[in-house]
Image: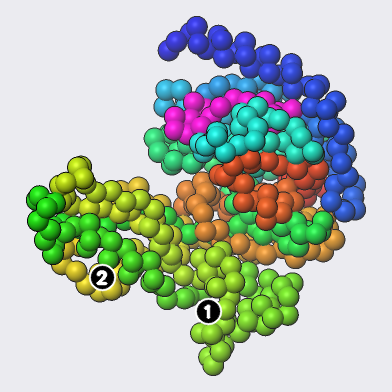
Amino acid sequence: MNWNRIIRVLAGAAALVGVASMPVAAQVAPPAAPGIPSNPSPIGDTSAIAREAQGWLADLVRINTTNPPGNEQMAAMYIAGILNKEGIKPEILEVTPGRSAVVARLRSGVMADPSKALLLVAHVDVVGVDKSKWTVDPFGAVMKDGYLYGRGAIDDKGMLAANLAGFIALKRANVRLNRDVIFLATADEEQGGDASIKILIAKHWDKFAAGFALNEGGEVLLKNGKVQYVAVQASEKVPVNVAVIARGTSGHASRPTKDNAVVHLASAIVKIGGYSAPVHFTTIARRYFEQLAAIEDDEIGKWMRSLDASDRGEHAQKVVSDANPLWNSMMRDTIAPTMLSAGVRANVIPGEARAILNIRLLPGDTVNMLLADLTKLVSDPQIRFEIQPDAGLAAPPSSLESDFYAAITRVAEREFSNAPVLPFQSTGATDSAQLRLHNVQAYGLLPFPLTDEDFRRMHGDDERIPLASFNKGVDLLARVLAEFAVAR
Ligand SMILES: [Zn+2]
């Protein structure tokens, strides 16, 4: 362990805590939250803590946790510093050297029941940036035009700061809890490697075992200044990478042969690119489309209601999946070729060419069944498929009948003028799958009202969060906590 470095980190974290308390609020007057009435909550008015949390978010953006390598340790220490100041005792869990999680707990009693506990989880690592495409410093936490810019502003440092705010608001309100509330900041979500929640669960489950969890993965969709719906993630697709390997005879490029591996690979990829897996609906996707049909425009709503119809079903599936890549991916396994490699010299025919397919399976589907279809489709003895070892795991969906799902629904409907709350099966993977495999009813609620344009910047250039939406998200999250975890 390098103590000089640790001391520098601590000094840096202390300085950041100092900065956090003032400049953000001074720079940005909070614009009005997007048209929402407010109701009294046992936690009280959250506008002051939301402004503080903007400062935490800005500081977290400035701590570069690009994964790989992640370096989540510094962010973990910063978070621990904030919790300590509130009189909450955090624990830093080192997962691998330099990569840590932070856990803290508000107790409901001496003998807490882990099956009732509520876990607030967010990851501190972020994906990389292409700095040349950003108009601001991706790690500068620039505040401009009512937005906070920075890698992780939405995914997932925004949620992390909001979780922290809700957790601290509970503590400050000094309310009686009916269940333990646990705060967890995780590492290595974006790569799911040696420092991920999987390892954290294997090593430290007793520190954060819970019956319920709130994580990223949902969305509050804002359109024309109004919340259209609140999607609560209760299930997710399963990522699997598959290599497509073509073999041929290597040789001098001046004498081409018919079994050229590059040509065979290219031909296979063209066929795979045109393939659509059969449609089927999981319980969550079915409920999602049923409820969404009511708020979509008449035309698409009509087709959404016909997805199962024996006569028009097939046409309806085509219309709906063509209308939106998300909807397409919610009703079938999808395949996206993402990487290609072959060749060492311009004048050498390579003996092998490879591609990677990023496959997203509906929970319950198996990659072997899909590969059986692809093998038939490609029908080329020079091509083989190789499942990569980094596949995700399929988890059972979280219940749509749980008290927690009901509490989220009640609060969200109240706060967003009866906007519908839909169950959501995300096409992307989150840490919730691992939690669901440990019997946690985990739900994804990214609590900030965001437009499609905001969502497109996640993992993209100029990621930013509207500060008004951030404040609203903090309030929503605090109200969900009040509804579910405060004793009445
Ligand atoms: Zn994320």
Q: Nearest the camera: 298 or 427?
A: 298
- In the image, the segment drawn in magenta is 53-72
Q: Nearest the camera: 204 or 25?
A: 25
Alpha-carbon neighbours of circle 1 within 10 Å: few (<14), some, or many (≥20)? Answer: some
In this orientation, does residue 447 appear?
A: yes
Q: Which residue is mark 2?
A: 378
Taking the image as shown, residue 348 lies to the left or right of residue 209, namely left
Q: Earlier in the sequence, mark 1 or mark 2?
A: 1
Vertical relation: 344 (above or below) 131:
below
Type of the residue with mark 1:
Lys
Vertical relation: 64 (above or below) 361:
above
Type of the residue with mark 2:
Val
Vertical relation: 43 (above or below) 418:
above
Residue 198: x percent and y percent? 43, 41
For the residues labelled 1 and 2, the Cα–Cα distance comes to 23 Å
The chosen color scheme is: rainbow
Under 8 Å from ligand 1: the CB of mark 1?
no
Residue 104: x percent and y percent? 62, 30
Taking the magenta stretch, the answer to whether it contains residue 63 is yes
- Asked if disc 1 and disc 2 are in contact, CB closer than 8 Å, the reply is no
In this orientation, does residue 185 appear?
A: no
Quadrant where the image shows the N terminus: top left
Extreme top residue here? 4
Q: Which residue is mark 1?
A: 318
Residue 116: x percent and y percent? 63, 47
Q: Which residue is located at x 69 percent, y 81 percent?
A: 299
